[in-house]
Image (cartoon, helix red, strand yellow):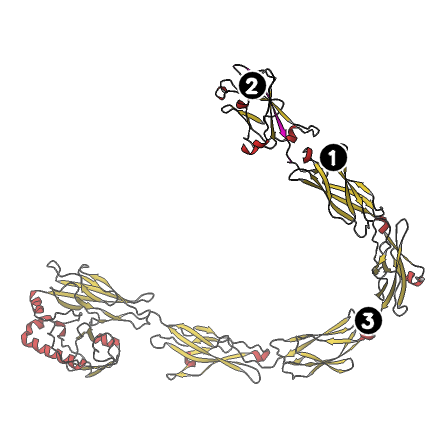
Amino acid sequence: MESYERYVILAIIFSFARYTSASVTHYSIPEEMKEGSVVANLATDLGLDVKTLNQRKMRLDIIANKKYLDLNKETGELYVVEKIDREHICPTKSLASCYLKLEVILDNPVRIFNIEVEILDMNDNAPQFRRDAIHLDISEATARGERFSLSNAVDPDVGSNSVKTYHLSESECFNIEVQTGRDGSKFADLILKKTLDREEQPVHNLILTAIDGGTPARSGTASVIVRVLDTNDNAPAFDKDNLNVKVMENSPIGSLVIRLSATDLDEGSNSDISYSYSLYTSEKTQETFNLNPATGEVTVKGILNYEDFRIYDMEVIASDKGASSLTGQCTIKILVEDMNDNHPEISIKSFQSPVTENIELDTVIAVVSVSDKDSGENGIVDLHVPDNMPFKLRESSDNYYELVVSETLDREKVPEYDITFTVTDRGSPPLSDNETMTLELLDVNDNVPQFPQSFYTIRVMENNAPGALLSSLTAFDPDLHENQYLVYFIIEKEIANTSMSMLFSINPENGNLYALKTFDYEIEKEFLFHIEARDSGSPPLSSNVTVHIIIVDQNDNAPVIVSPWRAQGSVVEEKIPRSTDKGSLIAKVIALDTDSVHNSRITYQFLQVTDTTLFSLDQYNGEIRTMRMFSYRDPRHQRLVVVAKDNGEPALSATVTIKLTTMETAVKAYSDMTEEPLEYDIFSDINLYLVIGLGSVSFLLLITILVTIVIKCQKPKPSKAAPPSRNSVISERNSTIADSTLVSNDAYWYSLFLAETRKGKLVVRQPLPKGSRYIVSSIPRGTGLTDTSDSAASTLQVRI
């Protein structure tokens, strides 16, 4: 409120009757005061008690206007409710003052106070023109000093805030003069200070600015667009005064020779141009060429012949259509050019076909001549053959050419050539002609038979039927006829005194390979030989391919149980102490399969067992161990049926039956006498009762024999001998084994001996003849008997 106090003028006029309505309170405020601004404190100015304003129902009545002001009944202040626009309240500019009339009414007693609030003008409006653009048309012939009235600007403000002057943007041809009207309004006249030229500048764009007298000053602008009206003061003009034009002979009637173009800087009818021949143009020229008066196009009207008439001269006049017509002229020389209207000709004098594919280089295939009836450049011709062919042209004499072989020919790549001879003259546009001849190539035997592969691997299932088709080995020869007829045969090769032709045969016509016998994987696993393909050319050509026959194994051999050893169809009987601990090794079943690795993988399972809770069988190594100790309730006799099954499809198997008899306390007491009780593998036909009855003398004798065998076989460092055990007693049975037997493979080894790897002991699996000797040339790995040697081929001698 303090910012507006300097604008509020309090002029309180009292009449002689102080409490009558004739008194008027006068206030002055500027327009555009902010909402909430306080105009005056009426309670103070009117001498009213602020505390009684609500009780006396003080109210404000605005006469014939919106409610721009209101009273605060708590403080008695008169304040602004809505911004006040003086130009809206008092739109008539002739009024010098603008008032808001108010009445303040109070009850108890009733009092009415007249209030006048004068609205003072502020420079809040800029001058405005009635139109944003002022258009003037002025002829370029108008004299200097001519005046043109411009519409004035209007400013709603009054007094010094209204329009005071005008300003014109910088112009070379115009300026303004400011005039004052009778009512004090300002307006401007446009004055021409330089002659106008429409061709130089057809339109003048000016800016007229009206400025008021307020502080700060406000302004408004309008565009003044002056269009210059044309007068016929420019003659038509051609781009060039002299033109040379070439036209081909035999040009069709109506074809365009040239399009003339004259320009006139004037506008309207002053710039409309028409074309015509001058008096200096000959009748021959006017008969041969037509001139369009509206467009200036010169077209062919008669037949043009280079040999009859070569040059035509004409003069063309361009006239405008102004009131006083102006003209321009142009000289044209038309030159008739010779036309390339004769095609070149080609003639084949000699052509040799067919030829062999091995024809020598530079051999002449054809002789060709060319000609053209035209003269000059149009009569000069060039002969061509395609660049992508193995031939080239060689000029033999004037306009004669020879076609010779330039590259080696190959019928297998390209059996024939369509040779196109193309002759072209050097005219513009060039004319050409062509002739196509077909050259056929004859085949020679220059390609060896080719197999798709250099090495064939053929897999054959064993037990195949004799005469079965193994594969088709077909070669390809790109030659023709007898040069591509192939014969197949097997290159002889002997393996173990057996010729390949006794094992395999091949169809000489189609290369089908057959087997002549049934193969057994366990005897023959692969064959390697060559097959040759030979064509029927002269001389014949051949190539061969390597064939690798792989015999694929079938599961045709059942596993063979080599441990525990037993006679054919017999049952293995074993005796074990009843006091055997849990986890003790009772027996180990070993089976061998002569099939391939995949088919010979063997797993072991119980087929039948007296008590499933008493024994366990490892399915991979065949070890039978106790799952618990024997109880007095367990039967004395246990029957185990073990099946060994291979991994083939379908699987084959073998079974072994083991009868176990448990010994009572006497055997247990004897077993307790040993210093190191061991877990031994199962063996057959051991008479444990004989061991018990021999006594201490036999017991010491057996220990001595066992120690001697171990020392001679393994040659270990002397150590204390181990006490005898039941598996070290070897039963004597009749056998026809030779005095010196060579154990040469693992299967034979496992059928005779069992190695206790943890104790380094050797256990005999089956009865051996007394006095026999075995030489083991290759001890299997993992037996524990080669501790003193790093070689897997250590020699072990066993004497019985």
Q: Amino acid at mark 2?
A: Ile
Asked if one can make out residue 712 in the rendered structure from this viewpoint, the answer is yes
Q: Along the polypeptide, which appears first: circle 3 or circle 2?
A: 2
Q: Is residue 64 left or right of residue 703?
A: right
Q: Give the SS element for disc 2.
A: strand
Q: Is residue 633 left or right of residue 197?
A: left
Q: Quadrant of residue 758?
A: bottom left
Q: Residues within 10 Å of mark 3 (few under 14, many from 20)?
A: some
- Residue at x 74%, y 33% (from the top left corner): 184
Q: Along the polypeptide, which appears first: circle 1 or circle 3?
A: 1
- Residue at x 20%, y 65% (from the top left corner): 624
* Pointers 3 and 2 in contact (C-beta within 8 Å): no
Q: Which residue is mark 2?
A: 105
* Pointers 1 and 3 in contact (C-beta within 8 Å): no
Q: Which residue is mark 3?
A: 342
- x and y percent of residue 100 in the render? 62, 25
Q: Amino acid at mark 1?
A: Ser
Would residue 110 be counted in the magenta stretch?
yes
Could you tell me which quadrant the N terminus lies in? top right
- Residue at x 24%, y 79% (from the top left corner): 790
- x and y percent of residue 448 in the render? 54, 80
- x and y percent of residue 601 in the render? 30, 68
Q: Quadrant of residue 668?
A: bottom left
Residue occupying the far front of the picture: 16
Q: Tell me where the magenta segment starts and ends, as one range.
A: 108-124
- Where 60 falls versus 586 (above or below)? above
Q: Is residue 263 left or right of residue 43?
A: right
- x and y percent of residue 655 in the render? 24, 66
Q: Which mark is residue 185?
A: 1
